[in-house]
Amino acid sequence: MRQRNLRDSTLIKRATILIVSLGIATLYGCVFPGVYKLNVQQGNIVTADMLAQLKPGMNQRQVTYIMGKPVLENPFSQNRWDYIYTLEKRDEIVKNYKISLFFNEAGQYVRYEGELPNDEFSEENQMNSIPKEESSPNTIQTDMPGS
């Protein structure tokens, strides 16, 4: 009986040491200073040209054709659509905006609210402003000669 208790005690100590070691290794991997962080682009790209095409009275299908599907749709109210865009470069938000479109009870476009992107903020400029990922020995080169 005493030998069994001793063996159980040894197993518990080993398991505890293993769990603590794995926990420390996991936490060390999370805060290691050499970890590469990706550039993250999320949401809808909205341009002044797109907003200029919107006319009061358009139905939701016509608005979707111009603007695309919104990132956020309220399931309880189809009268507001939110278009949100964020570009994060290594935990720093480089660009961020939100445009909200409003519809009447008949589902017709009424107006938009939000900060309108400036004139040079076209879709092409936004796509060109996305930072290129840094190359490393583990990445595939995308601008290879002859492609």
Image (spheres, rainbow, N blue to C red):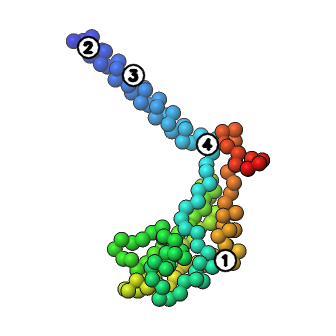
Residue 40 image offset from top left, x and y in percent? 59, 56
Q: For mark 4, what is the residue?
A: 35
Residue 133 image offset from top left, x and y in percent? 67, 51
Residue 67 image offset from top left, x and y in percent? 54, 74
Determine if residue 68 is in view: yes
Q: Could you classify mark 2 by the number of other residues whose Cα lies within 10 Å: few (under 14), some (14-19), or many (20 or more)?
A: few
Query: Which label is found at residue 14?
Result: 3
Front residue of 1 and 94: 94
Front residue of 19 and 122: 122
Residue 22 lies, with reference to residue 128, above or below; the image says above
Q: For mark 2, what is the residue?
A: 4
Residue 86 left/right relative to 3 = right
Q: Are marks 3 and 4 in contact (CB under 8 Å)?
A: no
Mark closer to the observer (1, 2): 1
- In 3D space, how far apart are the residues under numbered discs 2 and 3 (Cα atoms)? 15 Å
Residue 13 image offset from top left, x and y in percent? 37, 22
Dot placed on the residue nearer the N-terminal end, 1 or 4: 4
Q: Are marks 4 and 2 in contact (CB under 8 Å)?
A: no
Query: Which label is found at residue 142?
Result: none
Question: What secondary structure is marked by label 2?
Answer: helix
Residue that appears at 65% across and 70% down: 123
Dot placed on the residue nearer the N-terminal end, 3 or 4: 3
- In 3D space, how far apart are the residues under numbered discs 1 and 4 (Cα atoms)? 34 Å
The residue sitting at the right extreme is 145
